[in-house]
Image: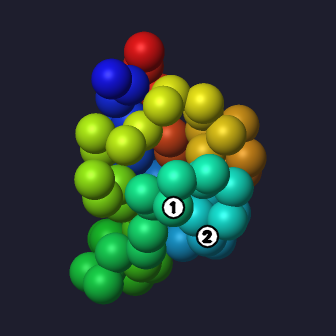
Amino acid sequence: MAKVIIDRERCKGCELCTLVCPHKIIVMSKLFNQKSYHPAEQIDPEKCTGCAFCAMTCPEVAIEVYK
């Protein structure tokens, strides 16, 4: 199982990661970060295959994927 780490404070809520995730397990949080953005968060981590599409598309380099 892969591990996705999202830096909530670096994320600006652009939602690109949510669009490219093939399993739709990345969603936008309802909570704000310190910069008043809704950061991305992972739901249902067991479904993550470690494709790293989310990390590759993140313009803020706020996502890391470990296999």
Residue 44, percent from left and from top: 28, 53
Residue type beneath disc 1: Lys
Examine the rendered structure and indicate whether residue 3 appears above or below residue 55: above
Q: Disc number at residue 24?
A: 1
Would you say residue 67 is visible in this rendering?
A: yes
> Looking at this rendering, what residue extends furthest in the top direction?
67
| Observer-nearest of 16 and 8 | 16
| Observer-nearest of 33 and 15 | 15
Examine the rendered structure and indicate whether residue 35 appears above or below residue 50: below
* Image point (37%, 43%), residue name: 47
Q: Place residue 32 in its image quadrant.
A: bottom left
* The N terminus: image quadrant: top left
Q: Earlier in the sequence, mark 1 or mark 2?
A: 2
* The C terminus: image quadrant: top left
* Image point (50%, 40%), residue name: 63
Residue 55, percent from left and from top: 61, 38
Instruction: Give the residue at mark 2.
Output: 15
Element marked by disc 2: loop
* Image point (50%, 28%), residue name: 50
In whole angstroms, how far apart are the C-alphas of marks 1 and 2? 12 Å
Would you say residue 8 is visible in this rendering?
A: no
Residue type beneath disc 2: Glu
| Observer-nearest of 44 and 58 | 44
Q: Place residue 9 in its image quadrant.
A: bottom left
Residue 7, percent from left and from top: 38, 46
